[in-house]
Amino acid sequence: MSAVIRKANVQDMERLKSFADSSKVSMEGTYGEPEGYYMMENEEGRLMAMAGLESVDGLGLLRSLVIDSEMCDLSLFVRFFDAVVVSAEQTGCTGAAFMTPSPELFETLGFEKWEETSEHAPETISKLARSAKGREAALMVKKF
């Protein structure tokens, strides 16, 4: 199956919000700001995946990741995810981070589970690590 990966534009925002809502994923804080969203569509224009990318303190935070598992196999997902991470690096971010309940998959993509906060960790990483504690999610980080 072929797919197109691209940055979202203003006209895409309602579709992205509906796609996120259908998976109970929040776009809070970034809804209405298309410059931070990426999407993958099939040849008919149907959404297969979306993700938000927000630069905070030089770190690319991946947010609102939604995948239509019926339309998007693992190889398409990896292609989409990699494209978003590469975009973070190309825009000058020093690394990428996100929270996931499935850290094993992302370790194969070069991400590491952030186990503990460090006094040398950027505030953004420390804050995310604190919010991951007590949740069934791991903070994953990749430095560029």
Image (cartoon, helix red, strand yellow):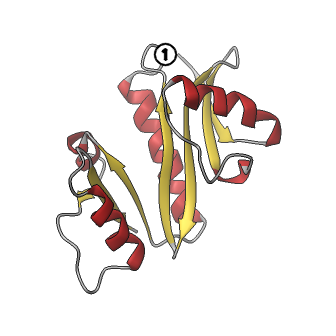
Quarter the C terminus occupies? bottom left
- Position of 61 with respect to 127 (left or right) is right
Q: Is residue 88 above or below residue 82?
A: below
Q: Quadrant of residue 124?
A: bottom left
Which residue is drawn at the image coordinates 57% and 59% (left, top)? 54
Q: Where is residue 83 in the image (x, y as percent from the top left)?
A: 52, 46
Q: What's the residue type where badge 1 is placed?
A: Met
Is residue 111 in sight in this rendering? no
Which residue is outermost to the bottom?
Answer: 119
Toward the viewer: 115 or 73? 115
Which residue is drawn at the image coordinates 70% and 20% (left, top)? 45
Which residue is outermost to the left?
Answer: 115
Which residue is drawn at the image coordinates 54% and 23% (left, top)? 22
Q: Where is residue 105 in the image (x, y as percent from the top left)?
A: 25, 40
Is residue 107 in sight in this rendering? yes
Q: Mark 1 points at which residue?
A: 71
Q: Where is residue 31 in the image (x, y as percent from the top left)?
A: 68, 46
Which residue is drawn at the image coordinates 64% and 26% (left, top)? 18
